Amino acid sequence: MRTKLIAGNWKMNNNVSDSLKLVNELNDLIKGEINAEILVCPPFTALYAVKQKLENSIIKLGAQNMHFESNGAFTGEISPIMLKDIGADFVIIGHSERRQYFNETDDLVNLKVKAALTNGIKPILCVGETLEQRERNMQEETVKNQLINGLKDIDDKNMNNVVVAYEPIWAIGTGRTATSIQANEMAYFIRDTIKDLYSLNISQNLLILYGGSVKGSNAKELMSQSDIDGALVGGASLKAGEFVSIIQNAMQ
């Protein structure tokens, strides 16, 4: 039985004090037995402070991006060693905004996934199609290529520590959401592709998240689908009450 994972991607929002305030609110609201993993991904400047605040919390810490090298002359970059040093459990890799605005390729994404795994950080590999690609019925071809290239040279053992997030680009920050059927069809396709690339066992244990305008009102329907194991939440994760509502609905 796969345990659900609800991840909050705060993107370029919240200074340190805002981040600590939000974490305090989450810690106060998340009570009782939670049958899911909870993850927050603050901006780099708040990672260390948030980690200290999460010391006795069930909430885990993730980063939004990283460089694939351990150190060196890469001005402005953060390495996996730095993330591991402050206690990051996860890192988001290949988010559509990184691909779109910073020209990240599948090859670069692959280097980052491998670096995360080498350093004991679980990568959340993001895949998804544009509106144009979906309208041309290219969504499966697009996602399959992103999986094949993003997971190149990753063996079975390491694959057990990879999370895949399906985020249709046309539904991110637009208010549009893929229907639960559309989202689950793609999640099933991802699982089937992983079965072909690896094995049935690995595919059955793979956590597949959905990302794209997830909120409390649609979380239950999305998370009740057979192949969706959680959510990568954007804007709604910046409001403690809304994020907790998503968690509660996901567990029903």
Image: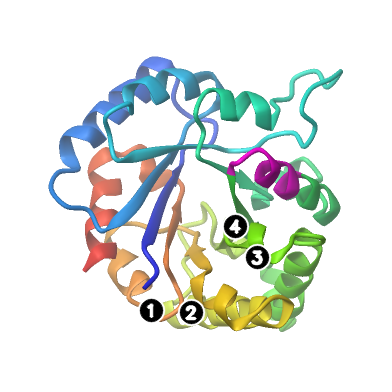
Does the segment drawn in magenta span residue 98? no
How many discs appear? 4
Q: Nearer the viewer, mark 4 or mark 3?
A: 4
**How far is disc 2 from disc 1 in space, using C-alphas?**
6 Å
Magenta residue span:
112-121
Q: Nearer the viewer, mark 1 or mark 3?
A: 1
Name the element at disc 4. Answer: loop
Amino acid beneath label 4: Val
**Circles 3 and 2: CB atoms closer than 8 Å:** no
**Circles 2 and 1: CB atoms closer than 8 Å:** yes
Residue situated in front as seen by the camera: 13 or 28: 28
Amino acid beneath label 1: Gln
The residue at 76%/50% (across/down) is 109
The image position of residue 217, as x and y in percent, is 27, 63
Name the element at disc 1. Answer: loop
Amino acid beneath label 2: Asn
Name the element at disc 3. Answer: loop
Question: Mark 4 or mark 2, which has the lower sequence index?
Answer: 4
Q: Which residue is mark 1?
A: 225
The residue at 31%/29% (across/down) is 23
Query: In the image, 218: left or right of 213?
Result: left
Q: Which residue is mark 2?
A: 184
**How far is disc 4 from disc 3 in space, using C-alphas?**
16 Å
